Image: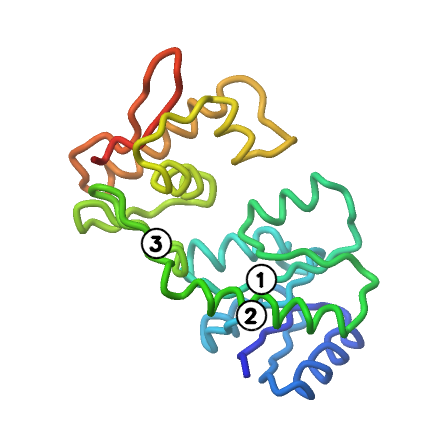
Amino acid sequence: MARILVVEDDPVIGGNVCDFLQARGHRCDWAPDGFVGMALAAREAPEVVVLDLNLPRLDGLIWCKRLREELGSNALVIMLTARDELADKLAGFDAGADDYLVKPFHLHELAARVEVLLRRQQGRADSQVLRAGRVVIDRAARRVQADRNEVHLSPKPYRLIELLAERPGRTFSRDELEQAIWGEEREQGDALRALVASTRRAFAQAGCRFDPIRTLHGHGYRLGAD
């Protein structure tokens, strides 16, 4: 059984989803808009969130980012939307979503995705802490520490450090990092350089006295925390 929060402005869809998931043994709360949903998420600490993208009062993308960054929640997020474009899906994942389901959808499929995500999370529970030199990453909580200082990172800087820490001895090319972080919707210009700079600032602001990202000119970047 999981604690599930359904944030959906359509009361019929919200009610049907809650009834169906409760019949499968889960505990469900429903929020009709983003503000109520955020209050419930802060109070109830759900394990799974079924989140509509087009919410009144607080957009679903912003809601998801706030869930991750302000509440520090590692809840599994399944985003519901009528949009089926690649750019929309990438925006959802970038905001912190774990899965994406396009409306209209079957309740059985939604329930199956909830179960798959829960099993996957349980199976990864013992391998969620990544240690690379002076950096420790708790993937389940999306938390980064360096020299025992907590480093507050938004989604893209977090993804950058996670990628580098997964293979700390490897130098990643610019193309590899851009593909992993932005996918096919790559940013133009110096977006990667700006991302590296903002990540370094976050480590400095946390009191870390080392450069977390080493630049190898003409080759790429590698973890600098060894």
- Name, please, the residue furthest toward the right: 104
Location of the C terminus (image quadrant): top left
Give the CA distance from mark 2 to mark 1: 6 Å
Which image quarter: residue 139?
bottom left
Q: Are marks 2 and 1 in contact (CB under 8 Å)?
A: yes
Note whether 214 is above or below 103 in the view shown: above
Nearest to the observer: residue 171 or residue 161: 171
Give the CA distance from mark 3 to mark 2: 18 Å
Residue drawn 53% across and 65% down? 120
Residue drawn 70% across and 68% down? 8
Identify residue for label 2.
48
Note whether 71 is above or below 211 in the view shown: below
Image coordinates for residue 19, horizontal then vertical, percent: 72, 85
Image coordinates for residue 109, horizontal then vertical, percent: 75, 69
Q: Which mark is residue 143?
A: 3
Figure label count:
3
Residue type at tag 3: Arg
Residue type at tag 2: Val
Which image quarter: residue 202?
top left
Residue 112 shown left or right of residue 202 in the figure: right
Q: Residues within 10 Å of mark 3 (few under 14, many from 20)?
A: some
Residue type at tag 1: Val
Mark nearer the N terminus (3 vs 2): 2
Q: Secondary structure at mark 2?
A: strand
Residue 125 shown left or right of residue 17 in the figure: left
Identify residue for label 1.
77
